Image (tube, helix red, strand yellow):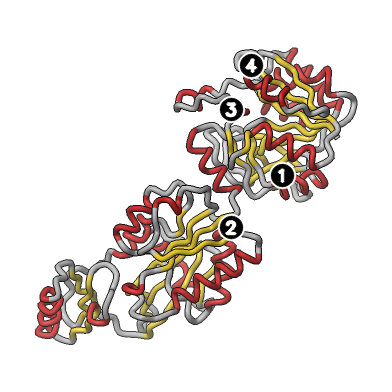
Amino acid sequence: MTFAVLAAGEGSRLEHEGIREPKPLIRIGGECLIDRLIRIFLSCGADKICVVVNSRRPEVKAHLESLRCPELHIVVADTPSSMHSLRALAPILGDKPIVLTTVDTVFREEDFRRYLREGDFAVTPWVDDEKPLWIDTDGGGFITAFRDEGPCPYVSGGIYRLTPPMMQVLEQCIRRGEARMRNFQRALLAAGFRLRAFPMERILDIDHRSDIAKAESFLSRDILLVHRSMRYTKGRPYDRLLLNAVGRILHEEDFRISETSEETLTAEMLHRPLHCVLSMARNPETLALLANCPWPVVNTPRAVLNAARRSDEDAPAPCWVKRNGYAEHPSDVVFAPNEAARQQAVEAMRARGISDIVCQHHREGREVKFYGAGRNFFRPDALPALREKALETAAEKELEIWGGDAVIGADGDIHIIDFNDWPSFSSCREEAAKAIAYYAVHQK
């Protein structure tokens, strides 16, 4: 099988952001982008790997030659576009189909192996490009259109299976003065080629400094669990039971799980590439530490702070007098049936050194606990109106793992009276743990 890599670009955006290495030699997880592609291609049975590089960064050619890989063929060409770079490779590609990628395309190896068996053009619903090429498909999974404007179900993933007749279309495009790969792809459709799309959950490009951390996180199999301080659990073990259940599921899926408490979390623990951090932390110092974490944190510190803020700051009695933020003691939440009780509760909190106090309306009706993870898990199932209201609140607060309490009045009105990050999921823990583990792997 023949593979080809376009590695002749300038990488100007990365250079402007202070990255001095040429793009092919940027390391993701300790491995150069070009080395990673060559390793994967060889493991997939490559008998020929053709790479085009430019003359302006001779260190790339020198690096490739140092690999002493007999399957590797190098072309040096200074070209005005990726289409012209592909054309520069044409004389050495041979007369068999090829699989072409750009050098900065980052994907999971298992997804790529399936693509080789089943697809022509790799596509992804993950949009993380400034100017994506949007793709429409038909019911059979064949590409029907390449669009500059979206939204469409997919965007191009930068991985293509090309045949010798397709290379003739490339030549025709260049002779017409075309210079963009997307116009070549459109020309293939116009010429009648049937292109089967192969969806990959996520494909990343390395165009900016921040993309390096995204790619390292995407490929990492390490997940850190941060347990909540007992100070915020009122002595109950349910939070730890939930996070432990999530960790077991992720471990069974070959993720490496490490754990810490929010009191013992250090900056050093966040230095290695992490697929994500699943954090129950609420302590302000810990949240400040996680705010500087380069890897995805679920829930984000900002969302946790959003959830801590309560509304109805000065509701009259009957009402609930609450410490604003997270309760640390049973007396941080007090029901006041009348004005005298309200004033007494406020004064008692102030005497304990609590100055930020809110008084929330008391709602009559049926109280319901609810739980959610992303948009695809919600309990209880039987209350769709509550689900919509809870999803709206979660989006408002930017929470990914959430839950709370609602009161459903006699007239059917729904009032959310409490909304928290990482609740215990006590009534549906095992089911929720599976949903949270799936969310941790795939995220949003």
Q: Residues within 10 Å of mark 3 (few under 14, many from 20)?
A: many
**Contact? badges 4 and 2 (CB < 8 Å):** no
Give percent across and percent down for residue 291: 37, 51
Q: Amino acid at mark 2?
A: Val
Q: Which mark is residue 441?
A: 2
Q: Distance of mark 4 from mark 2, alpha carbons?
A: 39 Å
- Of the numbered discs 1 and 2, the one sitting upstream in the chain is 1
Relative side of 382 to 265, left or right: right
**Contact? badges 3 and 2 (CB < 8 Å):** no
Q: Distance of mark 3 from mark 4, alpha carbons?
A: 12 Å
Residue shown at the point (67%, 20%) measured from the top left: 62
Q: Name above or below for residue 358 compared with residue 7.
A: below
- Of the numbered discs 1 and 4, the one sitting upstream in the chain is 4
Query: Which quadrant holds residue 171?
Result: top right
Q: On the image, numbered disc 1 is attached to which residue? A: 137
Q: Which mark is residue 58?
A: 4
Q: Amino acid at mark 4?
A: Pro
Relative side of 279 to 311, left or right: right
Q: Distance of mark 3 from mark 2, alpha carbons?
A: 27 Å
**Contact? badges 3 and 4 (CB < 8 Å):** no
Label 4: element kind: helix
Q: Residue furthest right?
A: 95
